[in-house]
Image (cartoon, coloured by chain):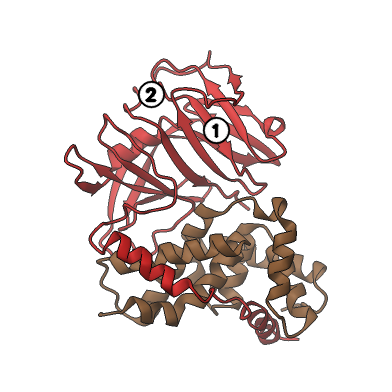
Amino acid sequence: MSKRSNEEWYRRSFDRLHLSDDFGKRLEERLKENGKESKMNTSIHGISRFAAAAIAGVIAFGSFGACYAADLGGIRTRIEIWMNGEKSEVEVEEDGMGYSWTDADGETYGFGGIALDEDGNESPISAEELAAYMNSECTLKAQDGRLMLFYKNLSTDVTDMVSAEGTLNVHISDPKNPYTYFSFSDITSDGTYGCSSSDTPEGGASYIELDASGLTDEAGPAPERSDNEAVGTYTTSD
Amino acid sequence: METDITEICARYGDRLYAAAFNVCRQPQDAEDAVQEALIRFYRSDTEFESEEHIKAWLLKVTVNAAKSTRRSFWNRNRTSYEDYMDSLGFEEPSDRSLMDAVLLLPEKYRIIIHLYYFEGYKTREIAEILSLSENTVKTRLTKSRRILRSNLEGWEDE
């Protein structure tokens, strides 16, 4: 059987998938609700709210690429961020939807969002705001069949700490960051997860206290903010 | 390039949904991802150069939105997944077997398989859409074919 046959079989199978009948109606309703001019303020994915820092929203998209960055007139900026326990300078590229960059393993990450000023005016977050956000967050990464948690220069194996429901609550005492109660959800074997952070523990939730004695002083203070919530994706290298 | 969102939805909606379902494995999340992509398209100031540019842009945004909306549906609501699959009315039992087998692949493999076999993209084009190196795409394509060969009767060597 040739490639064509596999292809025809695949297409015949996935051709059975169709949007539901009322999808168009719901799309129109949502467009009416928000209007064309209200840029990105209706995103259903991972909205963060940075109050005092005037950053209203950070939306994280897992592994989105920048293939059309050139077409969109993408701007490249170098920022310092903590990635997998190491502080490194990465070149992020603004591609019209946010920023993307590639780590040393060749994996691409993407984050984007909007900022609100005091008058409620929206603007895309800057690369510097992105860096401040990234440097105050916990991340998870699958490595050699284990799940590692990273926070600034700290890392620890949390494989056995994840609940059967794919959740993980951790607290890290970092005097430079008041929002250190991290709640991960929907952690999957291929490294996808959702994460929210807060300055107080969620009611009824128990948190694993992580040893922060080795925390470096290199990272600056985290931006002031209220609750935040983001969704991230990590895919392991081949 | 002037475009009408209703027309775009009619033209690309189902293929975006197929890509989103490949990632989410859950119909409602997949529709949410498609809706998000179409709204982003509607609001976008991007000057699209061609239909192919629109299609690739929409697929990229849909796949990323799908990754963001994905929940642990597979493990928690298997019965609902079965009900949904039953409702699809596959022509042949083997068609469902193929979809089941593909959806069991790791996400990073199955989206590449989908873009290759369903959308007909070349590995170089998939690499651009997913922002991966072409070698990574080729490696993952090879690995996913190998898995399908061992798990799916009728999937042939290429």
Chain depicted in red: A
Front residue of A57 and A31: A31
At 31% from the left and 79% from the top, the residue drawn is B4
Q: Nearer the viewer, mark 2 or mark 1?
A: 1
Above/below status of A102 relative to B10: above
Above/below status of A64 relative to A127: below
* Residue A119 x %, y %: 16, 41
Q: Which residue is mark 2?
A: A219
> What is the number of the mark on residue A183?
1
Chain B, hue in figure: brown
The quadrant in which residue B77 appears is bottom right
On what subunit does the disc labeled 1 rest?
A
* Residue A123 x %, y %: 23, 48
Mark 2 Cα within 10 Å, few/some/many (few <14, many 20+)? some
Looking at the picture, which amino acid does disc 1 mark? Ser
The quadrant in which residue A27 appears is bottom left
Q: CA distance from mark 2 to mark 1?
A: 22 Å
On what subunit does the disc labeled 2 rest?
A
